[in-house]
Amino acid sequence: MQIQSPHLAAGDTFLRMPLILVGCPSAAYSTIDIHASDTKGALHLTSVDEPATPHDTMRHWIVDRATVGDVSVRYGTPPRPVSLATRNGPLYDLRAQSDGMMGAGYYFIADVATTLTYNITLRWDLSHMPAGSRGVWSLGEGTQHTVAPAEILARSYYAAGIVHSEPKAGDSKFTFYWMGLAPPDVKTTAMQLQAVHSYLAKFFHDEQSSYRIFIRSNPYPGFGGTALAHSFMYGYSEKGGTDPSRVRTYIAHEMVHNWPSLDSDEYSDTAWYAEGTADYFSAVLPLRAGIISSADFLSLINDHAQVYYTSPYRGKSNKEAAAKAWIDDAAEKVPYARGFMYLAFVDAEIRAKSNGQRSVDTLVVELTDRQRHGEKVGLRDWLNLVEKELGPEGRQQYEAMVAGKTEAPSVNSFGPCFHPEPVELPRYDPGFDPMRLAIVSNLLGDSPAAKAGVKEGDLIVSMTAKRVLEKTAGEMMEMKVIRAGQPLTFNFSPYGPPQPGWQWVMSDGARSGSCKID
């Protein structure tokens, strides 16, 4: 990496890197791993680790003297070793794949610690890789030039090796990339998601936007994904079993992350907005575009409502949930479901107050437009717009959401085609870490699984999927494990006591084709 004349004084911070980012480790370079020099010669760097937060642990490198001219930096790392026991989580690491590697810059890039904008040129050296190798970045394939803050290098995805793509040329505004065998249903999924992306980009006034989806296989069960700059990475199990419709919903959520956000250093302050808008618009806009059916939409909003009303963190503040977000799957989901339900409530209130002339769309699109034009937009700006529409009650509703107060939904949430009804909802809780699907971890001694005979460290061969259990009330989970080389099978109910909540139903006389929530 070469940085043009950074003009650093002795003691200034030069580079930065997360050691841990939302539970995912990085290459965590030591001082001896990084070699820096300028026109005057070698630069000595000293590392300083910041106090850990629930979100990350950062390391900075400080220069020992003033820099002279351009600075060159060299460092490197092999991909992260992963196995059947690796915990499923955010895709911020770098992993080996068939004939190459794929991952996020956060894992291997120590970027320049500045908010300045740079003219960035990225080049690939593929001379030690197999013939026919390609190098792909979130912003394009091969050598790329862009003007952006330095942090975009870390906040991007990279793939190098025998990379396949759909379309094959890889020069489209919307492209899928993978290595090895093609993921299941990749062509159909690519076509459907391209339609979603086109509609989202038009809605957010960003029709020139490009988007790249990187797909890699995991050695453990389960799937997941994470959005970074103009891109998304999706990880799926080598053993299969992933529902393509769930994949499309998941990626649509991550696409929305390309637009709405609030500027803040505090995760708990704005996660509800980032994740809530992603859940909300990835459901509402595909319905509006006619890409998903009313039945699909109804299923989506009821899934979010079930997570919201059955959360063990119901009643806890956003800050309390955020403190546990990267060690407890239920805490991690709080801003998603809570943000979704809050935005649906605000939308119904604004539509009612404005006689249908404005909606939550109005607020989110305005803030996104302001950000695109270089303005820093934060929580205060959101609250100003909400209070402008709803008066003091708008702030009170926000404060109630932040505090974890459960509100009854507006009868007009999600338009006239659907209405909420009170129900008792089962709380899914198998009693062990649901993000480790290959090995029983963090087993609770009084859980249904433990009482059935499951033990910490059992190797999971298979278990009934949550989505299958949800379709049949009272279904028992069948869990097959291996313990000390012996196969064992257990059956138990993974549900705790039912919780009061709400689910939506189709209103009488509603015609599914007209339910667009315009």
Image (spheres, grey):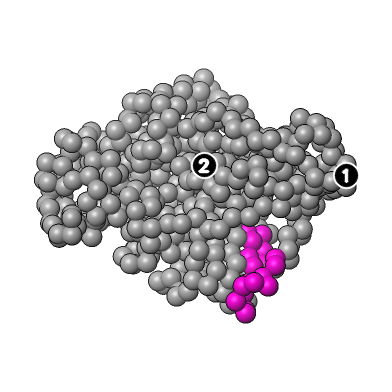
Residue 458 as seen in the image, left or right of residue 186: left
Q: Is residue 324 above or below residue 438?
A: above
Instruction: Decide whether residue 331 is among the magenta residues.
Output: no
- Secondary-structure class at tag 2: strand
Name which quarter of the figure residue 7 lies in: top right
Q: Nearer the viewer, residue 33 or 236?
A: 33
Q: Amino acid at mark 1?
A: Lys
Crowd tier of the residue under label 2, counting other residues whose Cα lies within 10 Å: few below 14, some 14–19, many 20 or above: many
**Residue at figure coordinates x 75%, y 39% from the top left:** 44
Residue at the image point whose x is 48% and y is 46% from the top: 24
Residue 40 is marked as: 1
Q: Say which amino acid is labelled 2.
A: Leu
Magenta-highlighted residues: 124-141
Q: CA separation, marks 1 and 2?
A: 35 Å
Most extreme residue toward the bottom is 131
Prevailing SS of the magenta stretch: loop
Q: Earlier in the sequence, mark 1 or mark 2?
A: 2
Element under label 1? loop
Please report the residue visible at 25 percent of the width from the left and 43 percent of the height from the top: 432
**Residue 389, how many percent across, how many down?**
55, 29
Nearest the viewer among 131 and 309 is: 131
Q: Which residue is mark 2?
A: 21
| Whether residue 204 can be seen here | no
Q: Nearer the viewer, mark 1 or mark 2?
A: 1
Q: Residue at x 43, y 64 (%)?
A: 217
Residue 96, percent across and down? 50, 63
- Relative side of 441 to 190, left or right: left
